[in-house]
Image (tube, rainbow, N blue to C red):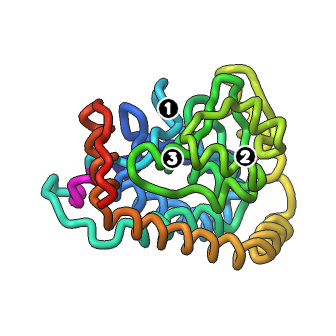
Amino acid sequence: MKTLIIDRSDGIATVSLNRPPVNAVSRQMQLELREAFETLSEDRQVGAVVLAAEGDRAFCGGIDLKETSSGTAATDDGSLRTTLNPGWEWRAAQRAIRHCAVPVIAAVERPAIGAGFGLVGVCDLIIASRTATFGLTEINVGLLGGASKALRMLGPYKTRMMMFTGRLQPAQELYRLGAVEELVEPGEALPRAKAIAAEIAGKSPLAIRLAKESIVRIETDEVETQYRTEWDYTNRLRGFQDSQEAMNAYLEKREPTWTWS
């Protein structure tokens, strides 16, 4: 894998985002996330998974805007190809995490914004450092997204505020609202997530898999319908010039000029 590091030890798999400098989600990462979690679901030696991140700048800084803006993605041989359906591939990656046969615990030390928030939102538990931040920042770059996870995690009013303003929220606020299971000191998110994963991995593997499947089935229909609606509106927005202008302005570090077109 080119964008992930996967480690298996004592019944726990750790999947770490590894795409410097901010672990931006590329098409390659989407494909690898799907492959990794589908493979781990089939591994009877894995009792729990921890989703973590390499680097000291971000858990995940969002979608790769340069790739999204150009409409192309790098392939394994270094060439470029047109990204025909990035929405489908991203949904498939997140679905693989959400439907992983065993519980997935997010260990978040640094900012998880945009697509990073989406990744955290499809995990079963979140352990966060006090220095971590979370945000639905898509509105700042002419996109939409993340509301389906935020609604379930935080409730309708906090979701509206985050979605409409793009403001970052401290981990303490998500802990207060019940989305973050534990708030830990800097550097302790991954060790604590692994400790909880070890506790889960020690349970009956059949019981854990049935428990995970049952709770996902209870939630799935509503969440996945919401997420599909979310993407329909994102694609609708991307059909306007103002969406591209927002993305260009962000990449060029200037103020956007809105044209209502």
Q: Nearer the viewer, residue 4 or 164?
A: 164
Is residue 97 highlighted in magenta? no
Give the mark nearest the N terminus, 1 or 2: 1
Q: Name the residue nearer the viewer: 128 or 212.
A: 128
Answer left or right for 240 relative to 232.
Answer: left
Q: Residue at x 24, y 57 (%)?
A: 73
Instruction: Give the residue at x 57% y 52%.
Output: 119
Q: N-terminal of the two: label 3 or label 2?
A: 3
- Could you say which quadrant of the image residue 83 lies in? bottom left
Who's the residue at 65% across and 53% down the image? 121
Task: Indicate which disc residue 114 carries.
Answer: 3
Q: Is residue 57 left or right of residue 251?
A: right
Residue tagged by mark 2? Answer: 158
Cα separation, mark 3 vs mark 2, equals: 15 Å
* SS type, badge 1: loop
Give the x, y percent position of residue 115.
50, 50
Callout 2 secondary element: helix
Q: Earlier in the sequence, mark 3 or mark 1?
A: 1
| Residue 70 on the magenta segment | yes
For label 1, the residue is: 58
Label 1 Cα neighbours within 10 Å, binned few <14 / some 14-19 / many ≥20: many
Along the viewing direction, whichever of 254 and 71 lies nearer the viewer: 254
Amino acid at circle 3: Gly
What's drawn in magenta, residue-wise?
A: 67-74
Q: Which is more foreground, mark 1 or mark 2? A: 2
